[in-house]
Amino acid sequence: MPLITIDPDKCNHDGLCAQACPVYLIRMEKGALPEAIDRAKELCIRCGHCVAVCPTGALSNSLMPTEDFLPVPENRPGADEVEALLLSRRSVRGFRKEPIPREQLERLIEVARRAPTASNSQNVSWVMIQDPAKLERVKELTAGWMTTVDRLKRYAEGLERGRDMVLRGGTALAMAYAPEAYLWGVADSAIALTYMELMASGMGLGACWGGLVTSACGQVPELAELMGIPEEYKACGALMLGLPKQKHLLIPPRNPARVKWL
């Protein structure tokens, strides 16, 4: 079966499918139907854009069933609403004890898995920890590693005084990981975690980046094993999640943008 199939009765010859393909696998001669180049099926990155941009539904991709595509929501927020979400987002470091319902965590992962990745490689995998005993062990192992790093000893001392400097009381921990050999693992994971963080904010949940856990995971084999991260994979980023204790009423100031206009 060829990569793309065109319904000639629906195609309006606008060439949008060829223009949208990021790896130039579709060609279209004037007056002819679009067609795939040689080895297109092998080279396709499965982004789905050729199907998604066709206004008449004339094109189908044999690697991506049309029924798996979702319609673009009609209630997409405008620029003002998006800006309000972005500017009001805060890192939350105080959480209530009630756990986040499982279906809400699943919704976060569903959004995060659709974040862009390099060449649509989709190499990011996830661990979501809710078990209180496992979270406590994550905290203990991370704290033990912190005592070996001079600049982090102060945080480790805070733990001894009852301050959770690792998970901040979060009731869930999302860890993104990717193959060690994959060049863009950290970047892709950061984008996906940002999607998750922003979605969490929109859902009224709190989130905070777990840099200490991520760093410790790369240094403490027992922690990586606890996380279920396979060999030849690496921890690329984490978010503590929970129901926030506080509500931020103001947007704090930040440094002016440093920009070179060329």
Image (cartoon, rainbow, N blue to C red):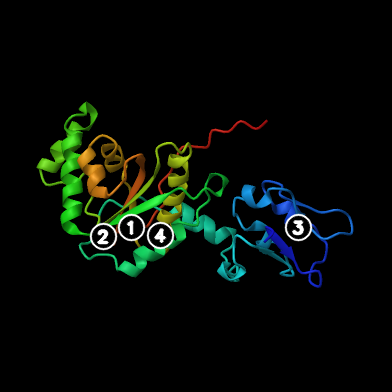
* Quadrant location of the N terminus in the rendered image: bottom right
Q: CA distance from mark 1 to mark 3?
A: 41 Å
Q: CA distance from mark 1 to mark 2?
A: 9 Å
| Front in this rendered view, residue 111 or 251 | 111
Mark 2 or mark 3: whose residue is earlier in sequence: 3
Q: In the image, what residue occupies the spot 24% across and 65% down?
A: 99
Closest to the camera, between mark 4 and mark 1, is: 4
CB atoms of marks 4 and 3 within 8 Å: no
Q: CA distance from mark 2 to mark 4?
A: 23 Å
Query: Percent position (x, y) of residue 202?
Result: 43, 62
In which image quadrant can residue 62 be found? Answer: bottom right
Please say if 199 is above or below 73.
above
The residue beneath circle 4 is 109
Q: In the image, what residue occupies the spot 46% across and 39% down?
A: 182
Mark 4 surroundings: few (<14), some (14-19) or many (≥20) residues within 10 A = many
SS of the residue at dot 3? helix
Mark 4 or mark 3: whose residue is earlier in sequence: 3
* Observer able to see residue 83: yes
Q: Which mark is residue 206?
A: 1
The residue beneath circle 3 is 16
Closest to the camera, between mark 2 and mark 3, is: 3
Q: Which mark is residue 245?
A: 2
CB atoms of marks 1 and 2 within 8 Å: yes
Instruction: Please identify the residue farthest to the top as the structure is shown.
Output: 150
SS of the residue at dot 2? loop
Callout 1, which amino acid?
A: Gly
Q: CA distance from mark 2 to mark 3?
A: 49 Å
